[in-house]
Image (spheres, helix red, strand yellow):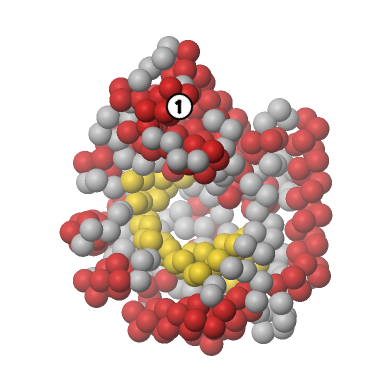
Amino acid sequence: MDRINVIIKTTNDCNLRCKYCYNSESWQKKERLPIQTFEKLITLLSKDFREICLVWHGGEPTMLGLDYFKQVVEIENSAHQVNGVAIRNSLQTNGTLLDKDWIDFFKKYDFKVGLSFDGKDSDKYRQQSQKTLQSIKLMQEKGLKTSCMAVVADDDYDLIENYKYFVDIGCAVEFSYVFMEGGAKDLKGLTKEKFVDKYIEFIDYWFNDKKGVDVRLIETYIAMAMGSYFRICSNSSCHGKYLSIYPDGTLYNCGRDNMSKYPFGNVFEINQFSDIYQSQGFKDLVTGSIQRRNICKSTCEFFDECAGGCADCAVTEGKLDTPAKFSCYCFKRIYTHVKQKMQEIKDKNIPLSQLNPAVARTLKRCFSVSDGNYDNLIAEKFL
């Protein structure tokens, strides 16, 4: 097999206590993922995959310390030397524990780093925002690209004003509505109609922002509208393509809490990746997802783009075998609007030079992947 994406839940512990954290019910669990468990995972996956894409997650992964991650790259280098497997690393962090040594390490070993930070009013639900901002600045000084995951936790969150804030600090951003799990269940939460209305206003602003920074969701939907197979995990059939490991070595589909209902077994109990297909957890997960997707396929015109949505969202909002109403509503309206924007660009023959530079970059990536090397002029001709 070619590639596997692995979310590594290094620990459930965290030095912050964000009010909306979907992992909050596990904060009291202080265990760390032993380095021997990671080594076993890499040995296992190297038998079946030529590329392993690791997402270091938590809790807060940097709580394991820099020496731990130095051992990680030693194990990865050894696996590459033995069997040629390519291992790529990304890490999601709140950024409060980073310093020069961490950032030098990230640069040396090509770690892609995403920061959890909500923007201009980040301290409303988080803490220590100034430390995160200091880390962003330090990363930029070292020439590392910075991108943030900003959680939209209530109807008061101003998407456009916060986007302007991220533009000002030179940071790409992804706006994610709050997962109604863990601590978020105690919040007022979002009104889906208000969230989508604001997001559509933001899309219109983003398309015309010539200073624009990347917003992955919009760019992914542009690619989808142009017929590309670029997908985020919630709009793809992720089972068998994603894997998550918890500190005790148990394997799941991904790092979201509801997936813990469907364990695939322990990394020390299986001999090859295909063994997870025989686990009851995998069978139950796939069976329920197939039932949900069959409903979507027979009733929804967006099935080819959505693939039945995210299993965790379905469980959070109701049942695994039933479509998730909130996320489904958001996807349909947001994706439709992005597609209409692309049609408008084509119909009015709007030059890409008048739009957010990310539009041209996205089209270039689409065409390069699908049909060869195309520059932006050919992208404009295509439109």
Q: In terms of depth relative to the viewer, which is nearer, 328 or 303?
A: 303
x, y (%) of residue 58?
47, 68
Q: Is residue 15 above or below residue 375?
A: below
x, y (%) of residue 237?
68, 49
Q: Residue at x 76, y 64 (%)?
A: 282
Q: Is residue 257 visible?
A: no
Q: Is residue 48 above or below residue 193?
A: below
**Residue lying furthest top in this view?**
348
Q: Residue at x 81, y 70 (%)?
A: 278
Q: Residue at x 50, y 52 (%)?
A: 184
Q: Where, quadrant-wise, is the N terminus in this rendering? A: bottom right
In the rendered view, does 350 fall on the left or right side of 6?
left
Q: Is residue 277 above or below residue 159?
A: below
**Residue lying furthest front in this view?**
372
Q: Residues within 10 Å of mark 1 (few under 14, many from 20)?
A: some
x, y (%) of residue 162?
31, 39
Image quadrant in which you'd find residue 84:
bottom right
Residue at image mark 1: 200
In the rendered view, does 121 fall on the left or right side of 297?
left
x, y (%) of residue 331?
58, 35
* Label 1 element class: helix
**Residue lying furthest bottom in this view?**
36
Q: Residue at x 72, y 65 (%)?
A: 262
The amino acid sitting under disc 1 is Ile
In the rendered view, does 189 fall on the left or right side of 359?
right
Q: Is residue 123 visible?
A: yes
Callout count: 1
